Image (tube, rainbow, N blue to C red):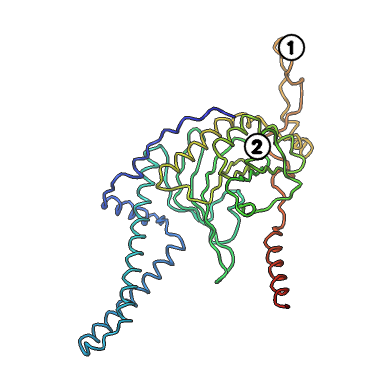
Amino acid sequence: MTAPQAAPSFDASPLTDPVDPRAVSAFNAQLRSRGKTGASATTIIAFVIFGVVFLVAMTVVGATMVSLFTDPGSSSFAGIGILLAAAVGITIAAVSWRRSRVARYRLDAFARANGMAYEARVMDPALPGMLFSLGRSREATDLVRGTTPRFVEFGNYQYTTGSGKNSTTHRWGYVAVKLDVPLPNIVLDAKGNNGFGSNLPASFQREQRLSLEGDFDQYFTLYCPEGYERDALYLFTPDIMARFIDNAAELDVEIVDDWLFLYTQRRASTLDPATWAWLFGAVGAVITKLDQWERWRDERLLLENPTAAASSRVAPQDASERLPFAPPVGLLSPPPGVAHEGRRLKKSFPWLPFVVVIGFAVFWFWSRSF
């Protein structure tokens, strides 16, 4: 296990300090002028409903007023009830609208105070993680990005599956860390955030599960492409495993191409300073150990492309300068990259939900027959 990490130092005051309403309005007007208000499809639907409720409320008000003046004794309690319900709905919609405006303003100020940048909304983000190709209406919101010591992006993400009454909107928080070289597709399914089975939106073939030493398996289920077990052991040395256990045990992890993703089913970009301290701490603890990953090379590329590999020969060294562990003169060194079989994990069909449904149907028919 690693020693406890010091709490990350960052300025959280913009998340909680009082705000100037005029500054909030000016900032959101600037976002609108750039076409980046951050208004999601859900927000747009909410405002449409708000408009309909407002029109209904005004109709009820008019009808109630006419009833009161023409026949005071016949005023409808139902009409008054509808009016009150509409007023409550309008108030809730207005409060939600104001809070979203203030939240965008605060997150932008927070990003700038900590040397980062804010973007309200990105449709269909071009990221290779398992979340970003699922469903439809894919969008990332409230993105906070930093570039030092490497590119890191914190964001909230949602996509929709199904249609009509059976549609479901899935919401995630994520952290995307840019790596220096492509690596094999590896997934760490955190056991601490699972419920009835894995919470991940994808299932992977059991043959790709790899057990690591120590107590790592108590916290994560690790998947790596078949044939890449030795490579996974090179990447996840005991000190790196300890970092993940100590700082990211509640986060699902995916390595794909030259990206490292941390996933959570709560908002990652938020006004909660404790959440930022948690995520900053996790990222900071992990990226300090990523330098050794830069040296990984996939020897399979030598077989895929001998011509390119030949151009990467190690330059001959002077015999007096060579060390006992130095590579032989002219050794072929594969270029950075991952062979085809290591780029993506093989997914499996999620049988469990269907087994549960079929079991319930059999039980229902069985119980009806008696």
Above or below for 362 versus 285: below
Q: Residue at x 72, y 70 (%)?
A: 362
Residue 208: % across, % down: 74, 45
Write down the quadrant of residue 300 in the picture. top right
The quadrant the C terminus occupies is bottom right
Say whether residue 251 is left or right of residue 49. Answer: right
Count of marks, rendered view: 2
Say whether residue 226 is left or right of residue 80. Answer: right
Q: Nearer the viewer, residue 43 or 82?
A: 82
The quadrant the N terminus occupies is top right
Above or below for 70 versus 187: below
Q: Residue at x 48, y 40 (%)?
A: 278
Above or below for 29 versus 277: below
Q: Amino acid at mark 2?
A: Phe
Q: Amino acid at mark 1?
A: Ala
Q: Residue at x 48, y 50 (%)?
A: 267
Residue 288: % across, % down: 55, 30
Q: Which numbered marker is on residue 338?
A: none
Q: Secondary structure at mark 1?
A: loop
Q: Which numbered marker is on residue 216?
A: 2
Q: Secondary structure at mark 2?
A: helix
Above or below for 55 versus 314: below
Q: Nearer the viewer, residue 135 or 329?
A: 135
Q: What is the C-alpha distance between the residues marked 2 and 1?
A: 43 Å
What residue does disc 1 label? 319
